[in-house]
Image (cartoon, rainbow, N blue to C red):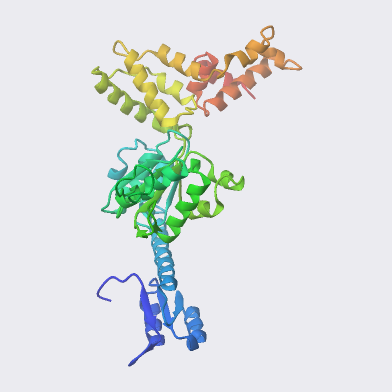
Amino acid sequence: ENQPVEIILLDLMMPHVSGHDILKHVRQRFPELPVIIVTGVNEVETAVHCIQQGAFDYVLKPVEIERLLPSIRRALEVRQLRRENSRLASSFFDKDPAHPEVFSRIITGNNTMKSLFRYCEAIAEGRQPVLITGETGVGKESIAKAVHDLSGRQGEYVTVNVAGLDDQIFADTLFGHARGAFTGADRNRPGLVEKAAGGSLFLDEIGDLSEPSQVKLLRFLEEREYYPLGSDQVHHSDARVIVATHRDLEQQHRKGLFRTDLFYRLRTHRIQVPPLRERKDDIPALLDFFLAQAATEFKKEKPRCPDDLITLLAGYDFPGNVRELRALAFDAMSHHRGATLAMTFFHKELGAASLPENPSTSPARILPQKSWAACFEHLPTLKGADQELIAEALRRSNNNQRAAALILGITPQALNQRLKRQP
């Protein structure tokens, strides 16, 4: 009652006091506190009764450490998950994160991103792995660093991209090696797991990990122990593992390309970072931020953006996401002359980005004698074609009328008039 306790090991047979009475008292006063019963072989039925009364587990005397430690580990994990669920429930109606400073490197005002931030806050202090998914360029690395910063862990934040690592290099990178483990190993070398002790280990591109390496990672996550290459000495680690991938792991495990047991071990906490096309309200702030960065780097004055630039960008899907927008802003600044950014640059770049990757196989090259109208078996009326073109432009611009007007080559006012005339 006076000191924080994470778990109770309770012997049913103690002098002067009944283990049953203590269990009843603990369940009444501290229902969230896990209790593991320690009992004799002849008391198994009594221990099962204690489980029914709320005990977490039981172990038989004489206590074997191989049986006790996994039980303690499971109890601590369940308690941590309950805490995280409680934090999630308490933050359900909050609109903004409690620690916005941690997310300052992520430029956003989007409500989906704010919900994601609140989820990060709820799970940050846990021990379970965190799986971050999302397309290339959405900012998965920044989310991983935020989870570490929120965790309160005093150890280092260590990162490694595991794509392309063969099994031996993966094992050596994470777990290190002993002297003489292989040719050239003239001394012991600690791995990144040891470097991340008390902190977080971020494994990027986990979807590209080879099957043998997946087995090693799974064992480490399950047992929290590992062997350096060439060593029979077991090492233990409390590093929090955070992983990220742009691949669809659920689809990969269904196809047999990713271990099912590892997939479910990793997805205890899953963070799906939305692509930029689903948070286009962030484009103005992101563009302003990147232009300011580029202006500083190129030692130029930050230019003014044309009124139609944001509308043009909002009509583009950004397959490279935030990273692509940053590259576009820096490229624009490198070509920039004058007080206002030139729209011609953006029209050229975004137009080129939407062309087929192989021009020789484009429909225009294959059928040069035919126009796009030849695709119709029966030509639509002018009125019908007008309506179809407007509908398609609105779809491509996410119902942004200014962007749709730019796509159609007319003014927003003209588009508005045409929409009013439609039935």
Residue 59 occupies which quadrant of the picture?
A: bottom left
Residue 411 position in % (x across, y down): 49, 15
Residue 384 occupies which quadrant of the picture?
A: top right
In the displayed orientation, state which residue is furthest to the bottom. 16
Residue 319 shows up from this direction: yes
| Left or right placement of residue 132 versus residue 422 in this view | left
Q: Is residue 211 above or below residue 322?
A: below
| Left or right placement of residue 165 versus residue 366 in this view | left
Residue 94 shows up from this direction: no
Q: Is residue 68 above or below residue 151?
A: below
Residue 168 position in % (x across, y down): 44, 45
Q: Which quadrant would the N terminus be assigned to in this image? A: bottom left
| Left or right placement of residue 32 versus residue 301 in this view | right
Q: How many marks?
A: 0
Q: Is residue 78 above or below residue 366?
A: below
Q: Nearer the viewer, residue 281 or 45?
A: 45
Q: Nearer the viewer, residue 52 or 72?
A: 72
Q: Is residue 27 above or below residue 401?
A: below
Residue 87 position in % (x across, y down): 38, 58
Residue 269 position in % (x across, y down): 45, 52
The residue that appears at 38% across and 18% down in the rendered structure is 307
Residue 380 occupies which quadrant of the picture?
A: top right
The residue that appears at 37% across and 55% down in the rendered structure is 231
The residue that appears at 45% across and 59% down in the rendered structure is 222
